[in-house]
Image: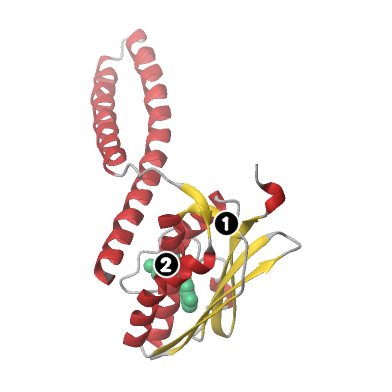
Amino acid sequence: LERQVQHHEKLATVGKIAAGVAHEIRNPLTSIKGFLQMMRHELERNGMGKEHSYTTVMLSEIERINGLVGELLLLSKPRELKMEALEMEELITVIAPLISSESILHNIEFALDLQPVPAVYADREMLKQVLWNLVKNAIEAMAETDGGKLKIESSYQEREGLVRVDIRDTGPGIPHYMLDRIFDTFFTTKETGTGLGLPICQRLVNDLGGKIQVTSKGFGTTVSVLLPGLVERNQP
Ligand code: ADP
Ligand code: MG
């Protein structure tokens, strides 16, 4: 099961990032192509045959990149998201055995402190992926220090209407100067890290109208996921 979850997570992550990268390539490529076609007309009008022939090669190379990007987009087409009201407690309880077994492997004491909170509106697999990514970072941080304590807490910030999940670890912490950079795409301090976990989690949570906060002061790290809670009066 663990393997399967990890494999699934990897595929979903690769798919999403591939789609993002593909779009980022395609947009500037379209503008390069447009300006190149204009240049091509100018070169033709001014009788610059040699330069004109270069643009033929350039345009066909652009088409090649376009084709590759199109393929990447097709391959990475994200599955349909199914948005629904989700109970945080239930969701965390479902992934808890996975967290437990991973914790035991790394000499980590794992504890839950779940307060009753309103439901949140999200895609189940997506939210599981976000929590699992953050937990994995905590476990990886403590694996470095040969163990520690991992605690997941849920609470409700009534004033802001936010459901809060804190993932606390007693790992080495994150140096102050690095806090600004950990959400950057491809930023990693791990030998085999991808640097995609946090930026993807942040993106997904932002899309749900929430945010991720990280606090680390010399020792240990707390990563908090904040999502709008579904309360009666907001429901149709
Ligand atoms: P990756 O896990 O592949 O390195 P992430 O985007 O998930 O990529 O994390 C980026 C970086 O943030 C990590 O390499 C690590 O330096 C830092 N980081 C994230 N979570 C923690 C944590 N709980 N404790 C210490 N460092 C962390
Ligand atoms: Mg990570």
Percent coordinates x, y for residue 149 in the rendering: 48, 88
- Is 158 displayed left or right of 154 in the figure? right
**Disc 2 residue: CB within 8 Å of ligand 2:** yes
The local secondary structure at tag 1 comes to: strand
Q: Residue extending furthest right? A: 159
- Provide the secondary structure element on which disc 2 rests: helix
Q: Quadrant of residue 195?
A: bottom left
Q: Is residue 188 visible?
A: no
Q: Is residue 17 left or right of residue 89?
A: left
Residue occupying the point 53% across, 62% down: 87
Pick the quarter of the image with the C terminus.
top right
Which residue is labeled 1 in the image?
Answer: 120
Kind of residue at badge 2? Asn
Residue type at mark 1 is: Val
Give the mark nearest the N terminus, 1 or 2: 1
**Residue assigned mark 2:** 133
Within 8 Å: ligand 1 and the Cβ of disc 1?
no
Ligand 1 in which quarter: bottom left
Q: Is residue 176 above or below residue 159?
A: below
User: Foreground: 46 or 66?
Assistant: 66
Instruction: Give the camera-side residue of 9 and 27.
Output: 9
Which one is closest to the eye, mark 1 or mark 2? 1
Visible in this render: residue 137? yes
Q: Residue at x 33, y 41 (%)?
A: 77
> How many other residues sit within 10 Å of disc 1, few (<14), some (14-19) or many (≥20)?
many
Residue 194 image position (x, y, % from top left): 35, 64
